[in-house]
Image (cartoon, rainbow, N blue to C red):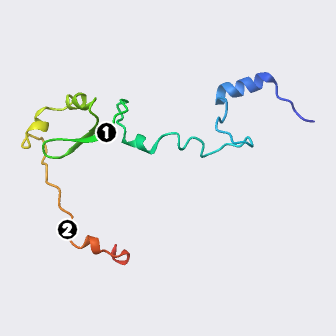
Amino acid sequence: MKKIKSQGYKKLKKAQFGPGPQNLDENGLEDPHAGWMDESPNDQDKCSCGSGLEKYPLEDARGIFVAYVCEKCENKVKAGYRSDIFEDGNYHADEQIEPEEEIGGDWQDAKPGNWW
């Protein structure tokens, strides 16, 4: 004997689990690739503040990365930091700031067999 589920069950299931997959292909099967190209590849270059402007790295006076900003949000982001870190390369820091080491040696001539 085949059981028929009531409309009440379907409503309960829909309320608990949502309407179900919205990205179905022509056969009614879920399409895992649906929507993967909705964003333009250039969207990754947009600022996360929502302005839609191109982002760029904000660095302090020593060249240390602070955040990605755009023309619209740069001043707002800077306002969250001490102003001297953007003006004076010798600003006071509570911890030692060591210069980054230059990549040296023959790394450009490295061969896969010599990696480790």
Q: Is residue 72 left or right of residue 59?
A: right
Local packing at callout 1 (Cα closer than 10 Å; few below 14, some 14-19, many 20+) is many
The disc labelled 2 sits on which kind of residue?
Gly
Q: Is residue 112 left or right of residue 3?
A: left
Q: Nearer the viewer, residue 14 or 27?
A: 27
In percent of width and height, residue 90 lies at 6, 43
In percent of width and height, residue 35 lies at 57, 40
What residue is pinned by disc 2?
A: 104
Gap in angstroms between the C-alphas marked 2 and 1: 31 Å
Q: How many numbered markers are drawn?
A: 2
**Badge 2 vs badge 1, beta-carbon distance below 8 Å:** no
Q: Quadrant of residue 94?
A: top left
Q: Is residue 52 left or right of residue 65?
A: right
Residue ID at (40%, 42%) = 44
The disc labelled 1 sits on which kind of residue?
Lys
In percent of width and height, residue 95 lies at 13, 45
Q: Quadrant of residue 108?
A: bottom left
Local packing at callout 2 (Cα closer than 10 Å; few below 14, some 14-19, many 20+) is few
What residue is pinned by disc 1?
A: 55
Circle 2: element type: loop
Circle 1: element type: loop
Q: Nearer the viewer, residue 34 or 99?
A: 34
